[in-house]
Structures are given as structure tokens and as C-alpha cells.
Amino acid sequence: MDEEINPSKEIFRTPKGMRDILPKEGNSFYRIENACRREARNYNFQKIDFPILENIDLFKKGTGLYTDIVEKQMYSFRTKGNEKLALRPEGTPSVIRAYFQEGMRAWRQPVKLWYMGPFFRHENPQAGRYRQFHQFGFEVLNDGAAVIDAQIIQLFFNLLEGLHLKDLVVEINSIGYPEERAVYQLALVKYLKRHFSQLCPDCQRRIRINPLRVLDCKQLSCQKIVAGAPQIIDYLSNECNNHFKEVLELLEELEIPYDLNPYLVRGLDYYTRTVFEIATVQNKKQDDEDQGKDKELRQTLVGGGRYDRLARSIGGNDMPAVGGAAGVERIIEAMKRAKVKPVYPEKPLVFLAQLGERAKKEALKLIEEFREKGVKVAELLGRDSLKAQLKRADSLGVKYAIIIGRKEAINRTVTLKTMKTGYQTSVDRDKITSVIKKRL
């Protein structure tokens, strides 16, 4: 009988915005990780794992001091040794830090790395968004060619299609280099100041410290103002224009659908030239005056771009680089909406039942022999009832049950039962793995 819960005892729960990932959803994580490994092999990327904790200045200088991630969302603290650390809110600065720290400049260039793991941001939890969330990313370091921008987009697009997601579209823009953005920002600030009173308080502050972040604002009132703002593409140099034109031509050659979004800048300060997002597109009926019309809803799954100046900002030398990252939870939500059938781990086809202590010892050895031959075997070693064990075998839908009792253990035999017909036969103990392997 289960012990009753004492109402006076404290029942601990996960912190707000964090959760347990149970086996059913874990299968989706496993499927996405397999897709990453497949594309990593296809495009010759190597996996990197970096610490969950990093020096806080890595993100202040790399991600950007006045970005929402650093200003509002980053978990930071002092250790007992007075170190200033942060739970990693994103992966790209860590990849660049590792490139210089671990001597990757001596490797064959470019260096192509991918990662997957948990990240942390203190933001309002909502569907598909948590304070502890998971991302995977692909980064190409020390290559400035436009074709690499296109290949990164192609990789992510293929990966999402491989997960049976449809109606994907790439939103893309070029934001040039900082010196070009400086000229653009003057025109942008001049425009925004004419609409200052209509902007949200955050954007009114952003005009003074980081005007490009206004273009990221999700407030409807700010989006309406942004829709009439100057476009950064009009301020690009010929070199950056040609780079961007080549990226678009390559996407067309690859038949990857894209939309030009002149106000896409991404929420991080280190981007240069190409920036992109990949979203799923849904059509939803509008209400009120637009009733009967379809409204296009986009859920962003991937974001990335080129970051040729990030290495300099965190103490390295200038180095061209490009990459992107995808939210695992968001992809899982998109798979659910698209009714993508979950993939479960391979079911066992054999069940091993035992009766008695000697039979238990023999069962443990037999399970190991099956494991070495690559045959997945289910068992219920903690139960002594043969009826209970065979009931479990039936519920698992296995093809065969192997029964070892006291008599079988002494005679070095096993009883092989075909579950569908109930037919039973005696098989030599030393031959059972070969017999099962042949039948399967």
C-alpha cells in the first residue's frame, strides 16, 4: 500500500519557468538530437560542449551590454571566491571564447562546430518558452564567403524539413558593418524622435542607448512606427550589398523560399551583414473588421547570421564567422501543431522471465549476452510471480518470452514461448541467443 502524503510536509516544485522533461517528451528531444547529428555528419561539423557557467563579461562584451538578454534576462551572481559568473543565455560567445582559448587557430580552417544543451534566461514563461530552455547551434569560424551564409541557412532548413515541418520560410536582411550602421542610426534616431510619444517606455530609452533594438520591439504601437522607418539596406556599402546579393542568389539556386525583411536586425549586438530567421507559417482567421480573411502567423524556430566582429569584442583578433541557433522546445511545439507523429525508442521483442534465485543469476548473465548481440530484452527481475511477468510481457507486445525456472537452471535449458500462439519448446541455454537472433 502506498504511503499517504502528509499534508503538513512541504512538497517541493520546480522553480517558475523550469520543468521536468518526462520520457514521452524526451523522445522528441532524442529525435531532434539525432537530426542534428545527421546534419553535422552531412556538413562536416564537430560537436563542442562548453560550460554552463561563464564569466559575465563574456556576454556583456559579446552579446551586448544594452541587449535585453544582458539587461533583463541573464542569471548572474558572485561566487564565494568573488568571481562574477552567469548562467549561459546563449552559445555563440562561448564558441568564440573556446576557439581562441583552445588553440583552434592551429586547426584546419574553417572550423565548423555544433552544440546542443540547456540555456537560461529570466523571462516570462509561455508556450514553448521557458527560463531553462534548450538550443542547438551550428557555427562556421574563420570563413567570410557568402556561400557559407547560404550553407548555414540550407543546413537549418534541411534539418527542420527532416523533422517533417512544412510551410517554412526564411526571413533575411543585411545590417552591414558597425561603421555603416552608425550612419544609418543617425537617420533612424531622427525618424524615431518624431514619433517619440507613441513609442513604449523601453523604446524611448533605447533611442538613447541602442536605437537598433527599437526594430526588435514586439509592441504593436512600436511595430507600426517601425514600418515607416528608414531601411538599413539603403545605407550599405557596395561590398556589403554585393555580399548580400550573392547570398540571395544562392538561396534562389537552392530553391529555399525567403522573404526580405528590411527591419530584421536580431536582438544581439554582434551581428554583421547577413541576419536571418526561419519560421513556420500558419494561416488563421481574423476577427472584427478583417473577419473572413486569413492572417499569417509566423513562429520563429531558428535565428542567426554573420558575426565578423565578435572575436574582436571579446579580446581576440577579427575573424569572419557565421552561425545560427534553434529552440528545441519551440520546434517540439511546431511538431505538435503539425501533427508530426512521435518516434518512440525501439520496443523489445523478447521478454526474460525467471523463477527463483538461481534463475535470477542465470537471467542476469543471459541479458548481458543478448546485449552483446544487439538484442533488446525486457524483464521484471524484482518480481517472483511468473503470471505477473508474463502479463508484463503481453502488455509490451513482445514476440517471445524466455522462461528460466529452477529446473531449467539446473539442466542448462530455457523454455521459449511464442507469445502469439502460446507454443512452448525447450532450448539449450547456450544456443538461445543464436536461436532468437535468427528468428528476429
Image: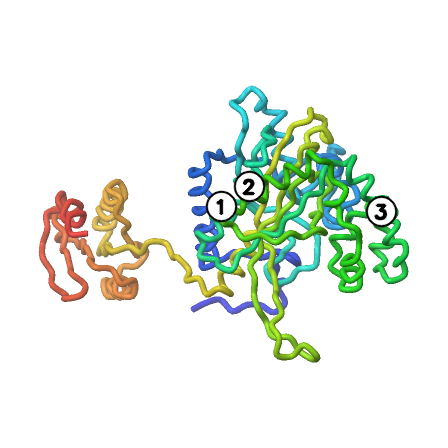
Residue 329 is left or right of residue 60, and the answer is left
The structure residue drawn at horizontal position 76% and vertical position 36%, both measured from the top left corner, is 178
Q: Is residue 1 above or below residue 149?
A: below
Q: Given the current orientation, which residue lies at the most extreme top position?
A: 106
The structure residue drawn at horizontal position 76% and vertical position 64%, both measured from the top left corner, is 220
Badge 3 density bin: few <14, some 14–19, many ≥20, Cα 10 Å: some
Provide the secondary structure element on which disc 1 rests: loop
Provide the secondary structure element on which disc 2 rests: helix
Amino acid type indicated by mark 3: Ala
Front position in the image: 377 or 191: 191
Picture quarter with the N terminus = bottom left
Front position in the image: 183 or 157: 183
Q: How is the image coloured?
A: rainbow
Return the mark for residue 187.
3
Return the mark for residue 150.
2
Residue 98 is left or right of residue 37, and the answer is right
Q: Are marks 1 and 2 in contact (CB under 8 Å)?
A: yes
Amino acid type indicated by mark 2: Ala
